Structure formats: C-alpha cells, structure tokens
Image: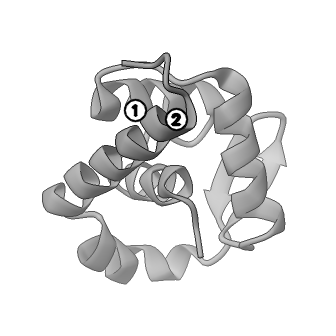
Amino acid sequence: GATDLETLIAILMIRDPAALDLAGIRDALQQALGRGIKKDEAEEALDRLVKLRSILVSDGPASYRFTVPAMLPQVGRELATDEDLKTAAERYIQESNHADPSSV
C-alpha cells in the first residue's frame, strides 16, 4: 500500500489546488505537518505515486496531476476529509520520528 507520506500528499493535492507542483506540495505539507520535509523525501514520494502507484502523472519538471481527474470529486469526498488529513499527518509524523530518532 501507499506510505503515509504518499497518502498525505494525495489528500493535500485533492484539497489544495495550489498543491500541483513540488513547491506547492511542500508548502501544503508544511501547513499540514507544522514542519517542512526534505525536498528529496517529497520528490521520492511523488515519484512513487507516478511510477509505482500510477496515481499521478508528471507534466514536466516538478508538476503533477491525477491520472484520472474524473475520479477526483468522488475520491475527494471519500478521502480528503479534515479527519483523514489529520490522521495522515499524525501517522506520517509518527513514522518519520521512528525512522529518525533525532527529529522532534
């Protein structure tokens, strides 16, 4: 299945029209998490969403869109609630804290 970061990115992209490129996605992550994430980490998650999950298509350097835009209204209603965003953010923070004991 998708990683917590991949899930969080997908939710943010559904909810935030500005989160369609790397900079916008990192800004949305900063807001959702209360802290930034490394550019490489965001790029790796986006790359997995494009290549492994086939959820996103890359429209050029650091520009992304969903592969099936017609699904967005239904997916958005089902996956992008405030509670889902909060849960995904908390799971990612917990996962990243376990991966890197120096992070607080």
Q: Is residue 38 above or below residue 71?
A: above
Image check: 104 left or right of 18?
Answer: left
Residue 61 — which label?
none
| Circle 2/circle 1 CB separation < 8 Å | yes
Between residues 8 and 18, which one lies in front from this camera angle?
8
Residue 28 — which label?
1
The location of residue 34, given as percent across then percent down, is 29, 23
Q: Secondary structure at mark 2?
A: helix
Quadrant holding the C terminus: top left
Q: CA distance from mark 2 to mark 1?
A: 5 Å
Residue drawn at x 40%, y 32% as measured from the top left = 28
Q: Quadrant of residue 31?
A: top left
Residue drawn at x 16%, y 56% as measured from the top left = 82
Say what amino acid the circle numbered 2 marks: Ile
Image check: 79 left or right of 64?
Answer: left
Q: Around disc 2, counting alpha carbons within 10 Å, would you say few (fewer than 14), some (14 to 19), or many (20 or more)?
A: many
Quadrant holding the N terminus: bottom right
Between residues 74 and 43, which one lies in front from this camera angle?
43
Q: How is the image coloured?
A: one colour
Q: Which residue is mark 2?
A: 25
Image check: 70 left or right of 29?
Answer: right
Q: Is residue 57 visible?
A: no
Say what amino acid the circle numbered 1 marks: Ala
Residue drawn at x 26%, y 53% as measured from the top left = 85
Residue drawn at x 44%, y 33% as measured from the top left = 97
